C-alpha cells in the first residue's frame, strides 16, 4: 500500500495531465484497499459486503465511529473518491496536482491511524525516489 502511495506521488511529479489521472486512479484504489483490508481483518463487514459498491462509504462510517478519522477527513476522502468518478464521466476533465497532494495526505492519515504506519518526510522522499528509479 505504501509503494502505491509513493507511485502516485512519483507520477504526480511529472506535471502531465494523463499521469495525474493515472496517479489519482492508483491512489484511489490504494485508499480503497487500505479501507477494505482493515475492515476485513477486523471483521467490520461480512464477506459479500466488503465487495459491494457501498463498502467504501460504510467502512468510512465505521472508522469514523471508531474515532480513527474525523468527519471532515471522511468527507474529503469521499470527495476525492467522487472526483475519479467524475473523471470517467466527463470529457476534458483535468486532475490538478493539489487533488493528488491532498488525497495523499489522507492516505497517509489512514495508514497511520489504521495500521500505525508512519514515515518521516525524508523517508517518504527516499521511497518515492526509489519508485522513480524502478518505474
Image (cartoon, helix red, strand yellow):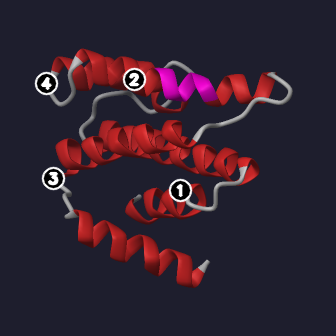
Q: Could you tell me how far apart the alpha carbons at marks 4 and 1 are, in whole angstroms?
A: 27 Å
82 falls in the magenta region: yes
Disc 3 residue crowd, few under 14, some 14–19, many 20+, Cα 10 Å:
few
Name the residue beneath numbered marker 2.
76
Compared with residue 75, is residue 99 higher up or lower down, i.e. above or below?
Answer: below
* Mark number, residue 8: 1
Segment colored magenta: 79-83
Q: Could you tell me how far apart the alpha carbons at marks 2 and 1 are, in whole angstroms?
A: 18 Å
Disc 2 residue crowd, few under 14, some 14–19, many 20+, Cα 10 Å:
some
Judge by depth and name the residue closer to the eye, 4 or 42: 4
**Label 2 vs 1, first from the N-terminus:** 1
Any part of residue 133 in sight: yes
Give the prevailing secondary structure in the magenta stretch: helix
User: Marks 3 and 1: CB-CB under 8 Å?
Assistant: no
Name the residue beneath numbered marker 3.
116
Compared with residue 36, is residue 91 higher up or lower down, i.e. above or below?
Answer: above
Disc 4 residue crowd, few under 14, some 14–19, many 20+, Cα 10 Å:
few
**Label 3 vs 1, first from the N-terminus:** 1
Name the residue beneath numbered marker 4.
67
Q: Residue, x 41% and y 46% (percent of image)? A: 104
Q: Is residue 70 left or right of residue 10?
A: left
**Label 4 vs 3, first from the N-terminus:** 4
Amino acid at each position: 500500500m505504501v509503494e502505491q502511495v509513493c507511485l502516485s506521488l512519483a507520477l504526480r511529479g511529472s506535471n502531465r495531465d494523463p499521469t495525474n489521472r493515472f496517479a489519482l486512479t492508483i491512489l484511489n484504489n490504494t485508499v480503497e484497499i487500505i479501507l477494505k483490508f482493515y475492515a476485513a481483518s477486523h471483521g467490520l463487514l461480512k464477506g459479500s459486503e466488503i465487495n459491494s459498491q457501498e463498502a467504501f462509504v460504510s467502512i468510512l462510517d465505521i472508522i469514523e465511529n471508531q474515532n480513527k478519522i474525523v468527519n471532515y477527513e471522511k468527507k474529503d476522502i469521499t470527495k476525492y473518491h467522487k472526483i475519479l468518478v467524475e473523471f470517467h464521466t466527463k470529457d476534458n476533465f483535468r486532475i490538478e496536482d493539489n487533488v493528488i497532494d491532498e488525497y495523499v495526505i489522507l492516505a497517509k492519515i489512514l495508514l497511520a491511524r489504521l495500521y500505525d504506519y508512519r514515515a518521516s518526510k525524508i523517508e517518504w522522499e527516499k521511497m518515492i525516489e526509489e519508485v522513480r528509479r524502478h518505474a
